Image: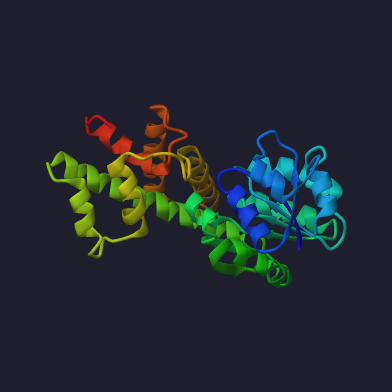
Amino acid sequence: MKIGFIGLGIMGRPMALNLRAAGHELVVPERRSLTQEVRAAATVVGDGAHVAEQADVIIVMVPDTPDVEGVLFGHHGVAEGLSKGKLVIDMSSISPIATKDYAARINALGCEYLDAPVSGGELGAKNAALTIMVGGPDSAFERALPLFEAMGKNITHVGSDNGAGQTCKVCNQIIVALNIQAVSEALTFARKAGADPAKVRTALMGGFASSRILEVHAERMINRTFAPGFRVRLHQKDLNLALSAAKEMGMALPSTAIAQQMFSVVAAAGGSDLDHSALVQAVEIMSGMKP
């Protein structure tokens, strides 16, 4: 297929290159930030409208809800270049409520829409091992499945209604945040009590406390390697989606609210662009320890 890809950042760039490696053609908009690798792999055009004109499927992978709206409906945006029968796939993590609106506006142009946010971070994107959570019509999902298989391993069609994928991603981000907080507290407790956090982690990996967060993020906490795979500020954005939706539905997410405040401590200390495993610094700061 001829794929338009907009959003070639930490996650989007390896995702797009994996599509190219699977034999699909790439069309991308001109950006000064485009790497030589991307320029060599893709046809570069002027803007989102031109991407949509040339591609059969347009994938969007940008940071937040307003970014998706701008890419799709802004000046020279994707919507201006769409023609009947094309497919738009938003793989960003954004508001489920806004997603329903965007899908309706794309559908009105005679095109299909899928929301397909991902989990797995930069490593998952590079290894084509992402978890992909998809919302939208069955026909569109079947059409897009070969593309998802080129980028991910665990692909789930969550529901035929747009917004289902984004709702699932919000659930994912709640669970990930609370697990990071739990591991942060446990390792800081070990350190404060005089135990070796690395050995504590090794011991816990063999028991019921074992988790992917303990495996990957605890190692980052111990080694102090907080180069971003997924930035603190982006996880804050996702938890804001959870908390605002919970308020609208009249439900409580008390632990999620606490995790959001812990991320805010890291951000206030200048860590907005660190990996979200840096949440451990908030526990250390609040415990009177030097991060």
The quadrant in which the N terminus is found is: bottom right
Q: Position of residue 137 (x, y in %)?
A: 70, 68
Image: 21 above or below 270: below
One can see residue 165 in this view: yes
Q: Is residue 70 left or right of residue 97?
A: right
Residue at x-position 69% and y-position 57%: 89
Camera-nearest residue between 155 and 159: 155
One can see residue 181 in this view: no
Q: Is residue 75 left or right of residue 204?
A: right
Quarter occupied by residue 275:
top left
Say how the picture is coloured.
rainbow
Residue positioned most to the right: 83
- Number of numbered discs overlaid on the protein picture: 0
Camera-nearest residue between 22 and 180: 22
Residue at x-position 70% and y-position 50%: 41
Q: In this view, does 212 lie to the left or right of 35?
A: left
Image: 261 above or below 98: above
The quadrant in which the C terminus is found is: top left
Camera-nearest residue between 35 and 97: 35
Q: Is residue 200 left or right of residue 96?
A: left
Residue positioned most to the left: 194
Q: Where is residue 45 in the image (x, y as percent from the top left)?
A: 80, 43
Residue positioned most to the top: 269
Residue at x-position 81% and y-position 60%: 86
Q: Where is residue 49 in the image (x, y as percent from the top left)?
A: 82, 45
Q: Position of residue 121 (x, y in %)?
A: 49, 51
